[in-house]
Image (cartoon, helix red, strand yellow):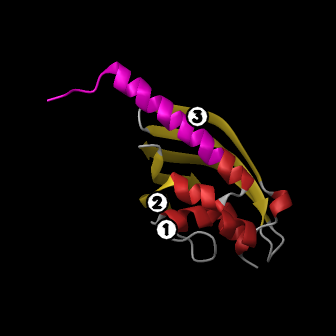
Amino acid sequence: MRTTGIADTVDASEVTRSTVRKFLELRLAGDTEGLTALFADTVDWILAENPVVPWIRPRSTAAECAAQADDLARYTVPEDARASVDTLLVDGTDAVLMGHLSGTVRATGKPFSGPFALRLTVDGGRITRHHLYENSVSIAAACTP
């Protein structure tokens, strides 16, 4: 039986940190094809469902997960979109990003903002878990006419 040593954790952390940076670069560039390749074939995706927010829905395939960025851009005003990452914690295959996001819903012209936390898990350089926790009340209010 093999136990995981410090070197294995450090190596996994380096892969995770590199993958998270790549994820952020691709997301910022709007590179859906690159994001699709970065997500695993099946992803453990959590983003609290909200029936009044059209870009928030269940997803599980790499293509569905990557398309979330396109959906968000379709329903919000791209030039008003802001996201900042204040904290990036990496431990082995897990990463947690914390920060703040804001934007404007295209259909209503209403703004939303709030803190977020994103938990990602990386296996073999691909994202297998994407759990996003955000201010869904603010977003739902912005989507409601």
Q: Position of residue 121 (x, y in %)?
A: 44, 45
Mark 1, residues whose alpha carbon is within 10 Å: few (<14), some, or many (≥20)? Answer: some
Q: In this view, which residue lies farthest toward the top?
A: 6
The residue sitting at 37% across, 20% down in the picture is 7
Mark with earlier residue (2, 3): 2
Pointers 2 and 1 in contact (C-beta within 8 Å):
yes
Q: Position of residue 50 (x, y in %)?
A: 56, 71
Give amino acid for label 3: Leu
Work out whether residue 74 or residue 35 is closer to the camera in this orientation and state it.
35
Which residue is label 1 attached to? 59
The residue sitting at 75% across, 54% down in the picture is 102
Q: Secondary structure at mark 1?
A: loop
Q: The C terminus lies in which quarter of the figure?
A: bottom right
Which residue is label 3 attached to? 88
Residue 9 found in image quarter:
top left
Give amino acid for label 2: Trp
Asked whether residue 121 appears in the rendered view, the answer is: yes
Q: Secondary structure at mark 3?
A: strand
Which residue is label 2 attached to? 45
Examine the structure image and report whether residue 9 is included in the region drawn in magenta.
yes
- Residue 94, disc: none
Asked whether residue 135 appears in the rendered view, the answer is: no
Give amino acid for label 1: Arg
